[in-house]
Amino acid sequence: MDFREYLKRKCREQNISLHRLAVRCDLNQIYFYQAVNKNKENPPPWVLRRAAPHLGVTYVELMIAAGHLTEDDLRDYTSHVPTPPASKEPERTREKVSV
Protein backbone atom coordinates (compact mmCIF):
# COMPACT_ATOMS: atom_id res chain seq x y z
CA MET A 1 0.00 0.00 0.00
CA ASP A 2 1.40 3.39 -0.91
CA PHE A 3 1.45 6.28 1.52
CA ARG A 4 -1.51 8.08 -0.03
CA GLU A 5 -3.74 5.06 0.48
CA TYR A 6 -2.38 4.63 4.02
CA LEU A 7 -3.18 8.27 4.82
CA LYS A 8 -6.69 8.03 3.38
CA ARG A 9 -7.34 4.83 5.36
CA LYS A 10 -6.19 6.51 8.59
CA CYS A 11 -8.49 9.45 7.85
CA ARG A 12 -11.43 7.07 7.34
CA GLU A 13 -10.58 5.31 10.63
CA GLN A 14 -10.62 8.67 12.43
CA ASN A 15 -13.77 9.73 10.56
CA ILE A 16 -12.20 12.87 9.07
CA SER A 17 -11.67 14.04 5.51
CA LEU A 18 -8.32 15.10 4.08
CA HIS A 19 -9.69 18.64 4.05
CA ARG A 20 -10.54 18.45 7.78
CA LEU A 21 -7.11 16.98 8.51
CA ALA A 22 -5.47 19.93 6.75
CA VAL A 23 -7.55 22.36 8.81
CA ARG A 24 -6.69 20.58 12.06
CA CYS A 25 -3.01 20.64 11.13
CA ASP A 26 -3.21 24.36 10.35
CA LEU A 27 -2.07 23.73 6.78
CA ASN A 28 -3.12 25.41 3.57
CA GLN A 29 -5.72 23.04 2.10
CA ILE A 30 -4.43 23.47 -1.46
CA TYR A 31 -0.86 22.72 -0.37
CA PHE A 32 -1.99 19.67 1.58
CA TYR A 33 -4.15 18.37 -1.28
CA GLN A 34 -1.25 18.70 -3.69
CA ALA A 35 1.19 17.15 -1.22
CA VAL A 36 -1.06 14.12 -0.87
CA ASN A 37 -2.55 13.72 -4.35
CA LYS A 38 -0.36 15.45 -6.92
CA ASN A 39 3.26 15.23 -5.78
CA LYS A 40 5.35 12.20 -6.58
CA GLU A 41 7.07 12.51 -3.20
CA ASN A 42 5.36 12.00 0.13
CA PRO A 43 4.67 14.96 2.44
CA PRO A 44 7.71 16.28 4.31
CA PRO A 45 8.37 15.35 7.96
CA TRP A 46 7.06 18.65 9.36
CA VAL A 47 3.65 17.96 7.81
CA LEU A 48 3.64 14.43 9.21
CA ARG A 49 4.48 15.74 12.70
CA ARG A 50 1.38 17.93 12.59
CA ALA A 51 -0.84 15.16 11.21
CA ALA A 52 0.13 12.28 13.51
CA PRO A 53 -1.97 13.18 16.58
CA HIS A 54 -5.07 13.70 14.43
CA LEU A 55 -4.65 10.29 12.78
CA GLY A 56 -4.22 8.30 15.98
CA VAL A 57 -0.67 7.24 15.13
CA THR A 58 2.78 8.29 16.25
CA TYR A 59 5.05 10.57 14.29
CA VAL A 60 7.50 7.68 13.86
CA GLU A 61 4.76 5.45 12.41
CA LEU A 62 3.95 8.12 9.82
CA MET A 63 7.63 8.63 9.03
CA ILE A 64 7.99 4.90 8.37
CA ALA A 65 4.79 4.75 6.29
CA ALA A 66 5.97 7.73 4.21
CA GLY A 67 9.37 6.14 3.64
CA HIS A 68 11.36 8.77 5.52
CA LEU A 69 12.47 6.15 8.08
CA THR A 70 12.91 2.39 8.01
CA GLU A 71 12.74 -0.20 10.76
CA ASP A 72 16.52 -0.55 10.36
CA ASP A 73 16.95 3.18 11.04
CA LEU A 74 15.09 2.74 14.32
CA ARG A 75 17.15 -0.29 15.31
CA ASP A 76 20.36 1.56 14.50
CA TYR A 77 19.23 4.59 16.49
CA THR A 78 18.15 2.67 19.57
CA SER A 79 21.36 0.66 19.60
CA HIS A 80 23.43 3.88 19.68
CA VAL A 81 21.44 5.91 22.19
CA PRO A 82 23.59 6.30 25.29
CA THR A 83 22.00 5.55 28.61
CA PRO A 84 22.19 8.39 31.11
CA PRO A 85 24.73 7.87 33.88
CA ALA A 86 23.44 6.95 37.29
CA SER A 87 23.29 9.87 39.67
CA LYS A 88 25.99 9.80 42.33
CA GLU A 89 24.23 12.31 44.56
CA PRO A 90 21.73 10.99 47.08
CA GLU A 91 18.17 12.16 46.63
CA ARG A 92 17.39 15.30 48.54
CA THR A 93 14.31 15.51 50.66
CA ARG A 94 12.48 18.72 51.24
CA GLU A 95 12.00 19.97 54.74
CA LYS A 96 8.48 20.70 55.82
CA VAL A 97 8.06 24.30 56.77
CA SER A 98 5.29 25.28 59.12
CA VAL A 99 3.57 28.54 58.47
Image (cartoon, rainbow, N blue to C red):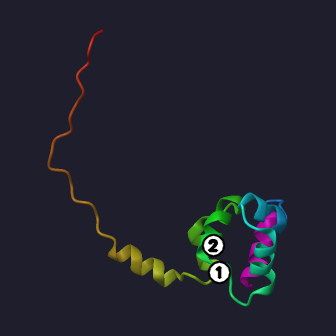
Measured as percent of width and height from the top left, residue 51 is found at: 68, 65
Marks 2 and 1 close (CB-CB < 8 Å): yes
Residue to which mark 2 is pinned:
62
Could you tell me how far apart the alpha carbons at marks 2 and 1 are, in whole angstroms?
6 Å
Q: Quadrant of residue 3?
A: bottom right
User: On the image, which quarter does residue 30 sit in?
Assistant: bottom right
Q: Residues within 10 Å of mark 2 (few under 14, many from 20)?
A: many
Name the image quarter holding the N terminus.
bottom right
In depth, the one of 69 and 33 nearer the eye is: 33
* Secondary structure type for disc 1: loop
Q: Is residue 89 left or right of residue 73?
A: left
Badge 1 amino acid:
Ala
Rendered position, 61 above or below 97: below
Task: Give the vertical position of 98 relative to 34 (above or below).
Answer: above
Q: Residue at x 69, y 88 (%)?
A: 41
Which SS type dominates the magenta stretch? helix
Residue 66, numbered circle? 1
Position above or below: 28 against 79: above
Task: Say which residue appears at 27% left-offset and 60% top-offset.
Answer: 84
Q: Which residues are magenta?
A: 1-13
